[in-house]
């Protein structure tokens, strides 16, 4: 008798704001293990904003995902059965096994995890893509100094909150934007930002003018759109921008649209560097121990919002775009 799994599939074409109703939970038979395969029972799955892009139907970093397709994504799980010398039953692993409770995966595509004193879910966030992206953006791309002010958009998100704190560790003055007064209070009162603005209720340009009367030095961009335009207007000549996302545009028909203030780049001689975690995979072995050490030493605050069960994966994903969650969103299965 074959093994069974529950998976999340695309139910309908996703148009506009993503909704939990765009997906469905389906049961399926798993293929028998071939040599080199393992059967993994997932403990946690990750939902991330970039997963919205394949649902637009446009080719990009990820191939388009159509109706009836299973959703891909990172997960941490336990090996239940193994036909590989690389992994044994009971090993904790991470890989792109997708939004499902069980999966047959090639052992070569999985990373065996050290969970001694480390929460397994951290490998989906601070010790995963979120941490690599934030660390690369601050330490490799922007490199803010103690004499500079850095603005971070979506500063209460998984990447933004780490980027803001890493910049503070470098001595920079850090300000941020978020989508609620609660998030802004958390950013200033607990995370330690110097100022934060609710972009839904306050004019972002006025906030940047007030906090940076002589101009903004650098900007860590997670959202694109009108926030990027406001930052471009506020930046000083020779200012620096690190672009790692355009989350505010992911529900648009043309999420690849550029900023309306683009000529400002020429006028001010700005430096804009696009980057993503995949570009720094070879350096992750150096990045992640530093992040782990900072976390254990209390130098970084890491917050996870946990949804429960495979049935709530679609709602967890939707929460990324409606402003409900602070920090990293994961689903515990």
Image (cartoon, helix red, strand yellow):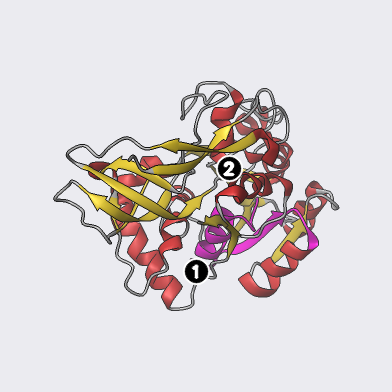
Q: Is residue 35 left or right of residue 293?
A: left
Residue 276 higher or lower than 186, as above or below: above
Question: In the rendered structure, does residue 174 fall within the stretch colored magenta?
Answer: yes
- Residue 171, x across and y down, in percent: 52, 68
CA gap between label 2 and label 1 equals 26 Å
Tell me where the magenta segment starts and ends, as one range: 154-181
| Residue positioned 45% across, 72% down in the render | 295
- Give the side of residue 213 with respect to residue 105, left or right: right
Q: Residue at x 27, y 60 (%)?
A: 91
Mark number displayed over residue 94 = none
Which x, y percent locates residue 251? 68, 32
Q: Which residue is mark 2?
A: 49
In percent of width and height, residue 243 lies at 54, 40
- Taking the image as drawn, is residue 49 in sight? yes
Instruction: Pick whichever, 97 or 30, lies toward us.
Output: 30
How many numbered discs? 2
């Amino acid at each position: 008798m074959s093994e069974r799994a529950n998976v999340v599939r695309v139910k309908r074409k996703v148009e506009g704001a993503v909704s939990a109703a765009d997906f469905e939970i389906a049961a399926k038979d798993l293929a028998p293990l071939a040599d080199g395969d393992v059967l993994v029972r997932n403990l946690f799955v990750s939902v991330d904003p970039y997963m919205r892009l394949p649902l637009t139907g446009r080719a990009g970093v990820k191939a388009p995902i159509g109706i009836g397709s299973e959703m891909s994504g990172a997960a941490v799980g336990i090996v239940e059965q193994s036909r590989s010398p690389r992994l044994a039953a009971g090993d904790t692993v991470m890989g792109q096994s997708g939004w499902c409770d069980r999966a047959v995966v090639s052992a070569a595509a999985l990373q065996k995890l050290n969970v001694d004193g480390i929460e397994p879910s951290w490998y989906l966030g601070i010790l995963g893509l979120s941490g690599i992206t934030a660390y690369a953006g601050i330490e490799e791309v922007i490199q803010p100094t103690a004499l500079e002010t850095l603005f971070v958009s979506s500063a209460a998100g998984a990447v933004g909150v780490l980027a803001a704190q890493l910049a503070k560790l470098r001595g920079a003055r850090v300000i941020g934007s978020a989508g609620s007064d609660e998030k802004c209070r958390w950013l200033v009162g607990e995370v330690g930002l110097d100022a934060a603005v609710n972009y839904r209720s306050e004019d972002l340009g006025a906030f940047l003018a007030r906090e940076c009367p002589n101009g903004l030095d650098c900007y860590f961009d997670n959202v694109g759109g009108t926030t990027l335009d406001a930052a471009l207007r506020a930046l000083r000549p020779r200012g620096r921008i690190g672009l790692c996302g355009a989350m505010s545009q992911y529900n648009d028909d043309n999420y690849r649209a550029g900023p309306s203030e683009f000529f400002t780049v020429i006028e001010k001689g700005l430096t804009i560097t696009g980057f993503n975690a995949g570009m720094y995979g070879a350096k992750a072995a150096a990045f992640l121990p530093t992040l782990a050490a900072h976390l254990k030493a209390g130098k970084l605050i890491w917050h996870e919002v946990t949804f429960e069960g495979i049935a709530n994966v679609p709602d967890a994903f939707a929460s990324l775009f409606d402003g409900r969650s602070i920090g990293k969103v994961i689903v515990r299965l």
